Image (cartoon, grey):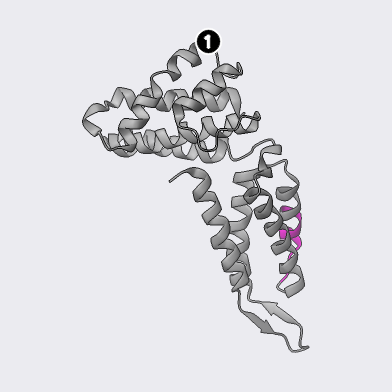
């Protein structure tokens, strides 16, 4: 499953969750939510917006400010909901690329962290899947950010498009040439053809790629 799919699924889950929050009535008849209900949702929404858009995005700043002031009243929670749905709409529409952090460092970094941990614990195959997923998606997203139409392209074509536009070069260019084969072995479960060293090379490349292109 691509990272983009995971993020969209999480946005959908949280939208469903906030829409289903049970309302209660106060003595004066004003509708409100139980604190434990809306805060659980808001914590998850806050974290997702941070990971996707970054610290400097209007969505994260606005949500953080509203979250800090939020009360149990329906109107206050709906303010948070509105910011969240705006963020979801921009992400679903592909407009998240205009923000500095995009979905880059935090989420790809998490995948690579998990891949390194799996490799250290001798779960080579798990590490390969995680590392190759982060590799393929980060390359494609970097290409999209730079105006290349690679949505339905295989990794080899994405790499070719990046090279043609001069977006990768030097050592990165030569190292990238070996990556599609490792990715294909991983995604087709040809585990006997992948060594721990192969997985380590993918992890190392993605770490450097994130530092140079997404930091």
Q: Residue at x 30, y 37 (%)?
A: 188
- What residue does disc 1 label? 170
Nearer to us in this view, 153 or 191 = 153
Q: Is residue 165 left or right of residue 110?
A: right
Q: Is residue 109 left or right of residue 21?
A: left
For numbered disc 1, what is the local secondary structure?
A: loop
Q: Start and end of the magenta stretch?
A: 64-71
Q: In the rendered image, which quarter contains the C terminus?
A: top right
Q: Looking at the picture, does residue 102 appear above or below residue 80?
A: above
Q: Is residue 125 left or right of residue 131?
A: left
The part of the image, by quadrant, that contains residue 187 is top left
The part of the image, by quadrant, that contains residue 51 is top right
Q: Residue at x 54, y 37 (%)?
A: 151
Q: Residue at x 36, y 38 (%)?
A: 129
The part of the image, by quadrant, that contains residue 29 is bottom right
- What percent of the width, then of the height, locates residue 169? 55, 13
- Does the magenta segment cover residue 85? no
- What percent of the width, then of the height, locates residue 142? 58, 30
Q: Looking at the picture, does residue 92 appear above or below residue 212?
A: below
Residue 122 visible, this angle: yes
- What percent of the width, then of the height, locates residue 119? 32, 33
Residue, far top: 170
Q: Residue at x 72, y 40 (%)?
A: 56
**Chief SS of the magenta region:** helix
Q: Residues within 10 Å of mark 1 (few under 14, many from 20)?
A: few
Nearer to us in this view, 140 or 208 = 140
């Amino acid at each position: 499953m691509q990272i983009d799919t995971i993020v969209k699924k999480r946005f959908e889950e949280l939208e469903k969750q906030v829409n289903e929050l049970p309302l209660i009535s106060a003595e004066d008849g004003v509708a409100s939510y139980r604190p434990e209900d809306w805060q659980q949702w808001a914590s998850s929404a806050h974290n997702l917006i941070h990971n996707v858009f970054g610290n400097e995005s209007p969505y994260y700043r606005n949500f953080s400010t509203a979250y800090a002031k939020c009360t149990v009243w329906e109107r206050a929670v709906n303010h948070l909901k509105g910011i969240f749905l705006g963020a979801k709409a921009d992400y679903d529409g592909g407009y998240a690329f205009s923000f500095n952090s995009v979905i880059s460092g935090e989420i790809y970094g998490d995948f690579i962290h998990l891949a390194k941990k799996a490799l250290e614990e001798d779960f080579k195959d798990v590490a390969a899947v995680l590392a190759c997923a982060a590799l393929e998606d980060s390359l494609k997203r970097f290409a999209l950010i730079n105006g290349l139409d690679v949505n339905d392209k295989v990794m080899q074509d994405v790499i070719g498009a990046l090279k043609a536009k001069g977006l990768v070069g030097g050592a990165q260019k030569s190292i990238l040439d070996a990556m599609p084969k490792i990715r294909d072995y991983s995604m087709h479960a040809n585990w006997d053809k992948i060594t721990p060293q192969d997985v380590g090379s993918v992890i190392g490349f993605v770490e450097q790629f994130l530092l140079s292109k997404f930091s």
